[in-house]
Image (cartoon, rainbow, N blue to C red):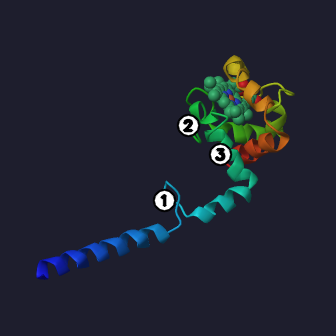
Amino acid sequence: MKVYFKLLLTLSIGISIISCGEKKETDATGNPINQAKTSVNQTPKELGKELFEGKGMCATCHKADQKIVGPSIKDISKIYTDKGASISLFLQGETDPIVDPSQYEIMKANLEITKAMTEAEVQALETYMLSIK
Ligand code: HEC
């Protein structure tokens, strides 16, 4: 009888732990569910970062402050700021390269991605890149 009671106790504790765990509203990655709201209220800089590292695949060739395949974001940001030029116009294929024109062919292919983006998305990419100093 004692053993039976112990088993029952263990079982009920077990169940209460499981149901307690279910009450937490988290998604598969463990983030609170209501975080979805913040992606709607994303700032342009946050959207730009997301596009830069995600859909745009820009991060494969551009690192914040190190030249890899492409110039660092810092270098691009500095040159565009110094010259008062527009990154978004470049990404829309409307202006010529000013950072490293000799390597432009490698960058040019990516303009197909950015030209297909909305004005807001391209602006967000510019905001993000210029925020890196
Ligand atoms: C395959 C590698 C590669 C990828 C991917 C890439 N870039 Fe580049 N990018 C380059 C290279 C190389 C240059 C230097 C040539 C140049 O200045 O045009 C460059 C230059 C640039 C410049 C400076 C252009 C100028 O005025 O000279 C900007 C701005 C830029 N990239 C933004 C982006 C963005 C935004 C993305 C993602 C949509 C991206 N790049 C993806 C290789 C890449």
Please tell me the numbered disc located at residue 121.
Answer: none
Residue lying furthest front in this view? 1
Instruction: Say what amino acid the circle numbered 3 marks.
Output: Glu
- With respect to residue 115, does 45 lie above or below? below
Q: Which residue is mark 3?
A: 50
Tell me where residue 18 appears, x and y as whole percent.
Answer: 38, 68
Say whether marks 3 and 1 touch (CB < 8 Å).
no
Tell me where residue 70 appears, x and y as whole percent.
Answer: 62, 28
Q: Which type of secondary structure does the marked residue at label 1 adopt? A: loop
Q: Sequence-wise, which precedes: disc 1 or disc 2?
A: 1
Tell me where residue 116 appears, x and y as whole percent.
Answer: 79, 30
Q: Is residue 101 left or right of residue 19?
A: right
Crowdedness near tag 2: few (<14), some (14–19) or many (≥20) residues, C-alpha within 10 Å: few
Q: Which type of secondary structure does the marked residue at label 2 adopt? A: loop
Crowdedness near tag 1: few (<14), some (14–19) or many (≥20) residues, C-alpha within 10 Å: few
Q: Considering depth in this image, is 92 or 100 the residue closer to the camera?
A: 92
